[in-house]
Image (spheres, rainbow, N blue to C red):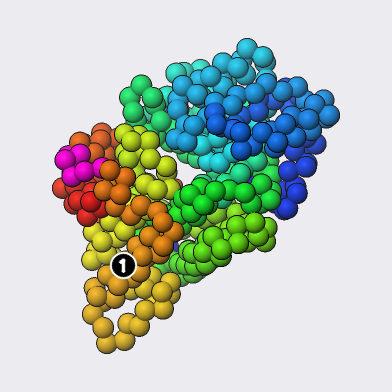
Amino acid sequence: MDKFEYYNPVRVICGLGESARVGKEAAKLGKRALLVSYQEHSFFNTLLENIQTQLRNEGVAVETLYAITANPMLSQIRQGVDLCKKHKLDLVIAVGGGSVMDASKAIAAGVLYPHDLWKMFNSRHDVAVAIPPEQSLPTLMIPTLPATSSEMNCIAVATNDETAEKSYIYHEILYPNVSIIDPRLTCGLPKFQTTCGAADAISHVMESYFNGTDDTPLQDRLHEGIILTIMELVQKILRDPGNESLRMSIQWAATVAWNGWMQCGVSPLTPMHHLGHILSAQHNITHGATLTIMMPAWMKHGYRYHLDRYVQFAERIFAIPTAGRDKEEVAREAIDRFEAFLKSLELPTRLSDVKIEADEIDFMTEEVARTAFTADGVLAGRPALDRSGVKAVYTLAI
Ligand SMILES: [Fe+2]
């Protein structure tokens, strides 16, 4: 287990119906709010109207930015910053999934940022080329999709629409002040959003489980608990989508998957996300769907380098018998079972499922090198990948 430092100041209010508290909580944080949600927000109209009413009843003035898309764009963040400056707003409220929450964090920090906004974002995995934000307006998150844990972490991901580069900020100034998690808001989520969100949450613990350090027995079992819980819950939810109890449980599982608790002492790396980001940046593929493609391919490439961990995964997640068996055979069986689980959710597991062909692999490999390689010329992970390794993983994903 590695040394670590942990800090998380987010006030979490979690429960069915708790979104009725948005007005009162917002009034503690500011007087003039920017309310941020999706460009396509018809699904949320009633909720957004309700929140606006709550805010006005508590004396909080509201401007709206309903402009965020999946894979939020830098230009949308710039719009939010301009609105905040123009109307002298002092609070940013997000109503939506990870895209809306991430954009809102970047807007809140961007208002007080003296440089060009893209300089806030890392453009290389471990090279300090970004200039971190030092201040932020307060933020209030109302997540509507269990997936990213943006409601309880200090990460914001965005795509620069001028360069088709997807990158992120990881800085504690971005922690939301308050997150009101009302799982009732997720009961009407369509199947694709539900399954993509579940897959994304699983991918967050898979990254640190397969790419972190060794000798982390408690963290291992926490990771396995999240994976098993979400696998079980998402299948139940598909049979009973309106079940509030199931929706609450999966929401909390997704929140803790990437709020930092799992990753303490594990030194997590996120190669699967970096490989997937290229698919989003070039083809605007939903984030969770990029992970369902990259996870099996990554595992098929990497299991020989970390074999005991994959055998543990086989035993503890799928109860695969291991006694007297070849470890590689056990690992491959677990990977096949995991890919079959993702397929059972009717999610893509191959590049060809999203119409990406082999002739794009060279270009995608160069994009990974450009956007995510370390100064040593590799994509960090277990194993670290050079260009030929990246190409090998993409090829396994065809
Ligand atoms: Fe993710």
Local SS, label 1? helix
Q: Is residue 302 above or below residue 189?
A: below
Q: Which of the pair 318/234 is nearer the observer?
A: 234
Q: Can the viewer see residue 244 in this picture?
A: yes
User: In the image, residue 11 lies at what x, y percent?
Assistant: 69, 45
Q: Which residues are magenta?
A: 356-362
Comparing 267 with 220, the one in front is 220
- The response on whether ligand 1 sits within 8 Å of label 1 is no
| Amino acid identity at mark 1 | Asp
Residue for point 23% across, 80% down: 326
- Left or right of 115: which side holds 64? right
Please say if 266 is above or below 273: below
| Residue located beneath label 1 in the image | 336
What is the count of numbered marks? 1
Q: Position of residue 166 (x, y in %)?
A: 37, 34
Any part of residue 128 in sight: no
Q: Residue drawn at (56%, 37%), measured in percent from left and top?
A: 101
Q: Residue furthest bottom?
A: 324
Q: What crowding class fits label 1: few (fewer than 14 Cα within 10 Å), some (14-19), or many (20 or more)?
A: some
Question: Which quarter of the figure is the N terminus placed in?
Answer: bottom left
Classify residue 130 as left or right of residue 184: left
Q: At which x and y percent is residue 353?
A: 30, 49
Residue under the image location 60 percent in, 17 percent down: 83
Q: Position of residue 81 (x, y in %)?
A: 56, 20
Q: Quadrant of residue 205?
A: bottom left
Residue 214, quarter of picture: bottom left
The prevailing secondary structure element of the residues shown in magenta is: helix
* In the image, residue 358 lies in the stretch drawn in magenta: yes
